[in-house]
Amino acid sequence: MMKKTEIDPTIKNLIRISLLLMILPALYLGLWIWISGSEELSYFEQVQLLMSYIPEPVRDPFLVTISLFGMSLVSAVFGLYGYIKSEADYPRKTSLFIMTLATIMCIWFGRSVF
């Protein structure tokens, strides 16, 4: 039986995996916000510039967006699971924060695709 202040290793790993899954979608989203702020480029040029940062074999915008949507969705699910299963306060708050950010990114990428 663990103390209420101890963090279960399984929950700790879920939080880590959830954070790792959010890295690429967050970087992509930040890059898109930075590129879309450029007023001298048309939308088509902005998309081309964004895709130039993606490796050529996987440069299809639809597949990239679907992949990032999936990563955000899995991150949100892991965050929710970590929130539900954790008994300590710190991992619950961390999981809730991760889940919220991942859900926002899911909505962003989902709106772009569907």
Image (cartoon, rainbow, N blue to C red):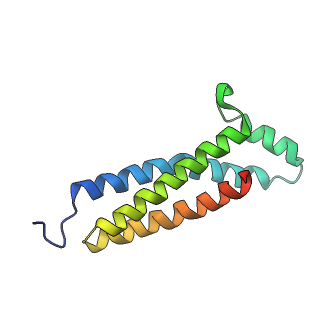
Q: Nearer the viewer, residue 23 or 34?
A: 23
Q: Is residue 74 left or right of residue 95?
A: right
| Rendered position, 102 above or below 97 | above
x then y, percent, for residue 54 = 66, 34
Image quadrant where one finds the C terminus: bottom right
Q: Going by the picture, which residue comes out furthest to the top?
A: 57
Q: Residue at x 53, y 60 (%)?
A: 102
Q: Going by the picture, which residue comes out furthest to the front?
A: 114
Residue 59 figure quarter = top right
Image quadrant where one finds the N terminus: bottom left
Q: Is residue 19 left or right of residue 40?
A: left
x then y, percent, for residue 63 = 67, 38
| Rendered position, 83 above or below 53 | below
x then y, percent, for residue 84 = 34, 68
Q: Residue at x 66, y 25 (%)?
A: 57
Q: How many marks?
A: 0
Q: Residue at x 42, y 53 (%)?
A: 18
Residue 64 figure quarter = top right
Q: Residue at x 59, y 43 (%)?
A: 67
x then y, percent, for residue 107 = 64, 61
